[in-house]
Image (cartoon, grey):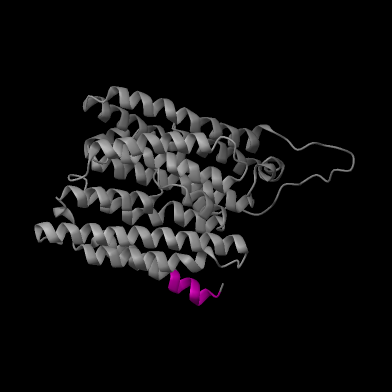
Amino acid sequence: MNPQAKLIFATSLLMGTTITISSNHWILAWTGLEINTLAILPLISKSHHPRAIEAATKYFLVQATASALVLFSSMTNAWHTGQWDITQLTHPTSCLILTSAIAMKLGLAPFHFWFPEVLQGSPLTTGLLLSTAMKFPPITLLYMTSQSLNPTLLTTMAILSTALGGWMGLNQTQTRKILAFSSISHLGWMAIIITYSPKLALLNFYLYTLMTAAAFLTLNSMKVLKLSTLMTSWSKTPTLSAMLLLTLLSLAGLPPLTGFLPKWLIIEELTKQEMAPTATIISLLSLLSLFFYLRLAYCSTITLPPHTTNHMKRWHTNKPVNTSVAILTTLSIMLLPISPIVLTIM
């Protein structure tokens, strides 16, 4: 793709996100979301492969539907209350429609079907944008309207997302689809806590972004799209494979890695809200995703390719590891000791 075109799309993404997260008026927020959608479409379809075109079409249709619902919800609220302010969303029907629209934009169950397909048709770098940056504006809208949303609906959607994200990721062989189901599962943890502790949901999103970025960039530098390719990565890049193992275990939420911090805080907050059974259910459901993270980790570090006489050995690559991968991986596995500071901020 032309560098100038890339610059225009990147600037548009940044502008769309900034407009949405800094706006108080529903129309401005909607405009930002639309700019974002239009800027990411060329990045999804840049390979001109039929699968990429299909992914871009699916993404456009889903996001257009969700944006129309956002507009419809804000108009209904303005009709009944005379308010266009995002924080003044008080009408029950508007809250219901908005929750559905944001769930559709994020890929929360039961509106999650488009996300794995779109991610599978996109390059790894675009997949990273779809999994992290593109979810930030809808999450901020949820954050701003969190006081008005229906906790029961969000809890149901959250448990469904964690269950489906873990369950549907079990038999996948494509790394992008596995990361898509991982994203759906993580969104469940954010949705369950957003009405009780919005700051905690944002913290979870930031740490999820950190860990997902580390995983995507590591896979991108190893050029891995399938589990079969991942099995041969140890002989090429042993250090990077070992780091990927730790990042995946962090994504799974195992102590003493960074990913344990948001899960621990969310379970603690749910217990304070007298929702211990819900906390137990969502914790048990996250064991499903732990299984496929362990499967990925097993493929990347513990399996070696078969050695036969006519098998050409893949030698180590001398390519230096990208600095951003090194920084993100370090942050993804070593942030748990700062939890006392996080607790004072919360």
Residue at 39 percent of width and 45 percent of height: 108
Q: Is residue 92 visible?
A: yes
Helix, strand or loop: magenta stretch: helix
> From the image, which quarter does the N terminus lie in?
bottom right
Tell me if 313 is positioned left or right of 236 in this view: right
Where residue 34 sits, quadrant-wise, is: bottom left
Magenta stretch encompasses residue 144: no
What stretch of residues is rendered in magenta?
2-9
- Give left or right: position of 89 versus 316: left
Which residue is drawn at the image coordinates 20% and 50% (left, top)?
A: 93
Quarter of the picture containing the C terminus is: top left
The front one of 93 and 340 is 93
Judge whether 339 appears above or below 318 on screen.
Answer: above
What count of labels does the image hold? 0
Q: Left or right of 282: which side holds 269?
A: left
Compared with 13, 141 (above or below) is above
Q: Measuring 30% from the left and 42% from the top, which residue is drawn there?
A: 201
- Residue 131 vs residue 154, the one in the foreground: 154
Q: Residue at the far right: name it.
A: 309
Q: Residue at x 66, y 32 (%)?
A: 302
Q: Is residue 258 visible?
A: no
Q: Quadrant of residue 256?
A: top left
Residue 2 percent across, percent down from the top left: 55, 75
Q: Position of residue 12 (x, y in %)?
A: 39, 70
Counting from the top left corner in percent of width and height, residue 144 is at 21, 51
**Residue most extreme to the left:** 82
